[in-house]
Amino acid sequence: MLSKESIERILTAALSHGGDFSEVYIERSKQSSVSLLNGVVEGTGSSLDCGIGIRILEGDKCVYVFSNDLYHEEKLIRMAQNASASLAGTPDGKTVYLEPQMEYFSQKYEIAPTAVSKSERVRKLRAASETAKAYSALITQTSASTADVEKDVWIANSDGLYVKDHRCRTRIMIQAISSSNEDKQYGYFGPGSGEGYEFFENYDIDALATEAARIATTMIDAKPCPSGKMPVVIGNGFGGVIFHEACGHALEATAVGIKSSYFTDMQGKQIASPIVTAYDDAKIAKEWGSYEIDDEGTASTTNLLIKDGILNSYLIDKIGSRRMGQSSTGCARRQNYSFAPTSRMSNTFIAAGSSKKEDIIADTEYGIYAANMGGGSVDTSTGEFNFAVNEAYMIRNGMICEPVKGATLIGKGNEVLMNIDRVGDDLKLAQGICGSVSGNIPVDVGQPTIRVSEITVGGQA
């Protein structure tokens, strides 16, 4: 591993030909996973990885290089010099000296994942698979897996910053598939936490498996969903994926800073219904998307994005800060050392309102109840999205009625935000993986139960 003095020399070399800012990101990680298909071990894995990323900025221009060699300082210095030479700046002859190292613990654990045997994980996953399979004769396939990562990162830059952070995350994934004739439906859950193996040990995996099987069997008998514009009540938890995709990405400086977002220059203006308040909060203890410092070494924040429908803040990293003339909000993230950081979400959610879920349903004469959302796609430049609904029901005369399948929600993020007319008091977060230009990162999405007064519903042909 590189010493503080070695890092100082690399940072200095990175400014030897051009650039006004240099940064080093060093990472050492341990990952493990176990997966079962129909109760049979399908695969297990363990890996160790380490590497370094060197970033140089000249204004809002960026050069990024990386290597998995942490033992040959002279090679890293040469790599930094070559990267610096690609920038057309004027070297200022700066010699970098780092402050004493600050140490953080973004995630603390009680039980290190690496201390738990694969056989113990297999036992718990197999029991969950058997629970899902026994739920109904319609369940024809189950899958269960767990994955974890322990990671140490060091971040240093030419402003003198020198920090170390300890990180640990654990996730469980359960899926049940039902079959009838040629039709297949599935139920899926993938909870995760910023904890160690204690999360896996304390979680009721059998209840999770039962719920996945219930969704799969319920939807196999569902009739096709009708299509058209109608009110839609979207369930709490993973229902927040629509806000994440159709609004959250458009608030990132990655898009706003280059004026490719439909929320560019909208700060202080109304972009949502007055009953909508939303946050990106990386400071929530033990959450999947939380951290103490971001991947530029900036302290995390509780970022109020929308207040009573008014756009309050963006998600801003260092380059975004330079482009937008605003301070960083501590949201620079990356998958690993092979990616340069950029502005990303952490735990992003619509805040709880005052309505009860049962009252929202009772006040809806006709529409769709989207109990569990699936995947989808969005164009961040326009906000247009298309999301599948994994579990949906008709609402008639203020009551949840028969299940329907093949439902999709189609619309534009800014229009949906303005059409939210009820916000529940049952806020819940759900875990996922978000992909963007700086790789795949763990995030929470979330919301209470909400009602969109009108949205286009696509049905099953």
Image (cartoon, grey):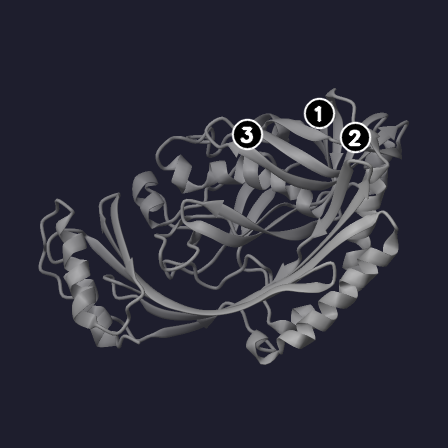
Image position, residue 138 (x, y; %): 85, 47
What is the spatial separation of the Cα atoms under label 3 and label 1, in whole angstroms?
25 Å
Q: Residue at x 21, y 65 (%)?
A: 76
Q: Residue furthest top?
A: 228
Q: Is residue 181 visible?
A: yes
The amino acid type of the residue labelled 3 equals Gln
| Image-based side of 340 in relation to 46, left or right | left
Label 1 neighbour load within 10 Å: few <14, some 14-19, many 20+: many
| Image-based side of 211 in relation to 380, left or right | right
Decide: is 186 above or below 108: above
Label 2 neighbour load within 10 Å: few <14, some 14-19, many 20+: many
The quarter holding residue 159 reads bottom left
How many marks can you see?
3
Q: Residue at x 67, y 72 (%)?
A: 121
The amino acid type of the residue labelled 2 equals Ile
Q: Nearer the viewer, mark 3 or mark 1?
A: 1
- Name the element at disc 2: strand
Q: Quadrant where the C terminus lies?
A: top right
User: Is there a contact, CB below 8 Å, between mark 3 and mark 1?
Assistant: no
Given residues 332 and 151, the one toward you in this image is 151
- Name the element at disc 1: strand
Image position, residue 445 (x, y; %): 61, 48
Image position, residue 309 (x, y; %): 59, 34
| Disc with the residue nearer the chain's start (3 vs 1) | 3
Given residues 11 and 357, the one toward you in this image is 11
| Disc with the residue nearer the chain's start (2 vs 3) | 3
Give the labeled residue for mark 2.
Answer: 368
Give the labeled residue for mark 3.
Answer: 270
The amino acid type of the residue labelled 1 equals Val
Image position, residue 250 (x, y; %): 48, 36
Q: Is residue 424 visible?
A: no
